[in-house]
Image (cartoon, rainbow, N blue to C red):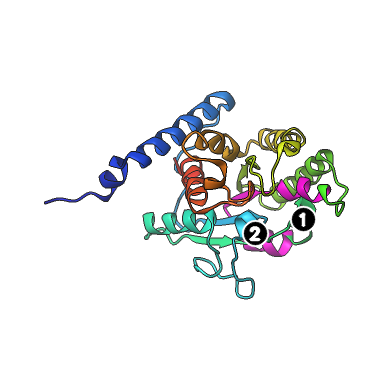
Amino acid sequence: MSFSRRKFIKNSVGSIGLSTMVGSILASCSEKTSQKTKNTISPNTTILFQGDSITDAGREKKLELPNNSSSFGNGYAFLAASHLLNSFPKENLKLYNRGISGNKVYQLSDRWDKDCLKLKPNILSILIGVNDYWHTRDGNYNGTSQTYESDYRKLIEKTKKELPNIKIAICQPFILKENSVVDDSWIEPFKEYQISAKKISDEFKAIWVPFQDVFNEAIKYAPAEYWLYDGVHAAMPGAQLMAETWLKTITY
């Protein structure tokens, strides 16, 4: 009896629904932006995940080794990296996670030489933005969406200058309304940050990873807290959905 893991996964009801949903959203984004992404994984590719706590996901920060489970934490970056290493065992991939909890764009910039340029990634994935807004709500940061956009633009300009052949993925910052953290007062101001991120992505012809769009569809299947336990950070199924979205956007 032959057994196909791929067929088994595709034939599960939940997998069919979510896979179709993600595929449809990505196809729509490609049509709107003329974004066409083919397989970008070639031999000896170095991939870097950057961002805040959503990317950090509890990773260790002493050794920060490539292709190491402790150095990747337990979030979407770990799941996406594991899939790539499993799918391309002969390609000698090198994957890093350098997300740090609490970071805003200017804090990425402060550590960019060490945590990006020195690693010389071929593919750079950045998910940043929620703290740039969130931290303004408690009075601990006085930046604006304009600050976010300006800082982000400078960061990408510096990266492209130092690594002109790099492929960059800008991940859409996201939230879901959920009573413990995110309420109605978040929605409209946070959209300004999402608009800025998309503007940066378009300006630099980056790959756009539409996390918010996918989560907006996901809540038709299950409540917000099922995907993002506090409206910001991914629960287990949310991390898997992010990984699937990232993989389909970057590699197909």
Total marks shown come to 2
Give the residue displayed 62% in from the left and 43% down from the top: 171
Residue 129 or 158: which is nearer the viewer? 129
Q: In which quarter of the image is the C terminus?
A: top left
> Dot 1 corresponds to which residue?
109
**93 above or below 9?**
below
The location of residue 30, given as percent across then percent down, is 53, 29
The location of residue 118, given as percent across then percent down, is 67, 63
Give the residue displayed 37% in from the left and 41% down from the top: 14
Q: Quadrant of residue 209?
A: top right
Classify mark 2: residues with Cα within 10 Å, few (<14), some (14-19) or many (20+).
Answer: many
Classify mark 1: residues with Cα within 10 Å, few (<14), some (14-19) or many (20+).
Answer: some
Give the residue displayed 38% in from the left and 58% down from the top: 86
Determine if residue 120 is in view. Answer: no
Q: Which residues fall within the magenta stretch?
A: 112-136
Determine if residue 227 is in view. Answer: yes
Is 124 within the magenta?
yes
The CA span between labels 1 and 2 is 12 Å
Amino acid, disc 2:
Gly
Helix, strand or loop under label 2: loop
Helix, strand or loop under label 1: helix
Give the residue displayed 53% in from the left and 70% down from the top: 70
The location of residue 94, given as percent across then percent down, is 51, 62
Q: Nearer the viewer, mark 1 or mark 2?
A: 2
Q: Residue furthest bottom?
A: 62
> Dot 2 corresponds to which residue?
99
The location of residue 76, given as percent across then percent down, is 53, 53
Is 73 within the magenta?
no
Amino acid, disc 1:
Ser
Residue 159 or 56: which is nearer the viewer? 56
